[in-house]
Image (cartoon, grey):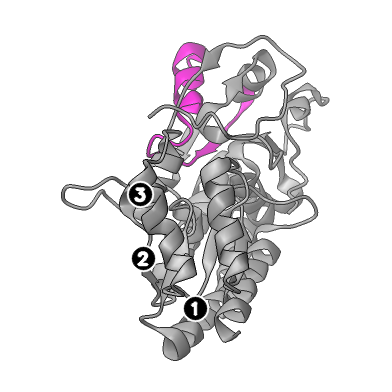
Amino acid sequence: MPAPASRLLAPLTTGVCLVCLAGCGGSSGSGGDNDAGQSPAAASVVPVVASTNVYGDLAEQIGGAKVQVTSIISDPDQDPHSYEANTQNQLALSKAKVVIENGGGYDDFVDRMLKSGDSSADVINAVKVSGKTAPAGGELNEHVWYDFPTVARLADRIAAALAKADPADAATFTRNAKGFEEKLKPLEREEARIKAGHGGERVAITEPVPLYLLQAAGLQNATPEAFSEAIEEGDDVSARTLQQTLALFSGKKVEALVYNEQTSGPQTEKAEQAAKAAGIPVVPVTETLPHGKDYLGWMTANVDALASALAK
């Protein structure tokens, strides 16, 4: 799908563009593009490349000091759907023993570079790990990192891949994965608490990024599909669809607007303004880790913000 023209893209300052694709649409110490130029890791450290810092952080949580992680996309202003890969990315992938990608059309640049570089890395595809598929007559929601059961399974898969690359530390990776999964449980309990208190309530979204979280919390997405689909595709929203969407707020037909901050454009800004004018809470979310956050802290903030908005 064509990348949204309204997405905020940070300039790439290094490397030569190898692949430019258009897709759908915490700090992890793994960093971004420049990490590929770091000094080689010691032989006992497993080199890992993740398509975004979301998956880079998971690898660090599980691998600890036994991994060297390069997250290709780590800036919240960069859009994975239309990312332009560079030579440093290719170099990092050529050295990786483990590669973590989202899949589902989200970060196809990873597969393209792996094929061109003849990589032998163990590739973990989060969408495949999730087992999720497109509904009949619909499209796959590829944003599986907002689904906590998927993330728990992904932790186990990462631990297994690291153990294969470094058998001597297999027990450490397994222990770290289990510890991480235990820390996910409070998030699932909070989703259940929201569902108990607000199940069936209607909310609006700008894009399907947070839908797995909202569904787990028992909330109903009232947004016209044509609106969120057009925003995700980077297409213009028809006047009729925009009016239908804005009426959700002026008519107070939803309890909150969950807004993807990594998408900005006239239509989404009108939706945000309409929600605020009607006194409807706006809950901002992102696709990659904000600066200074790890995955658990980021998702805790997202769930807490949703709960607070619904309580107003």
Please tell me which residue is depicted at 28% across the width and 45% down the height of the picture.
139
Residue 194 part of the magenta segment = no
| Viewport quadrant of the C terminus | bottom right
Q: Label 3 to label 2, Cα distance in Å?
A: 13 Å
Please tell me which residue is depicted at 32% across the width and 52% down the height of the picture.
225
Q: Residue furthest left?
A: 136
| Viewport quadrant of the N terminus | top left
Q: Label 3 to label 1, Cα distance in Å?
A: 30 Å
For the residue labelled by badge 2, is the local secondary structure a helix, a strand or a loop? loop
Drawn side of residue 236 relative to residue 78, left or right? left
Q: Residue furthest bottom?
A: 197
Near-viewer residue (194 or 264): 264
Q: Badges 3 and 2: C-beta atoms under 8 Å apart? A: no
Dot 3 or dot 2, earlier in sequence: 2
Q: Nearer the viewer, mark 3 or mark 1?
A: 3
- Amino acid type, mark 1: Glu
Q: Where in the figure is residue 250, as x and y percent of width and height? A: 48, 68
For the residue labelled by badge 1, is the local secondary structure a helix, a strand or a loop? helix
Per the image, the residue denoted by label 3 is: 241
- Amino acid type, mark 2: Ala
Drawn side of residue 298 relative to residue 210, left or right? right
Disc on res. 191: 1
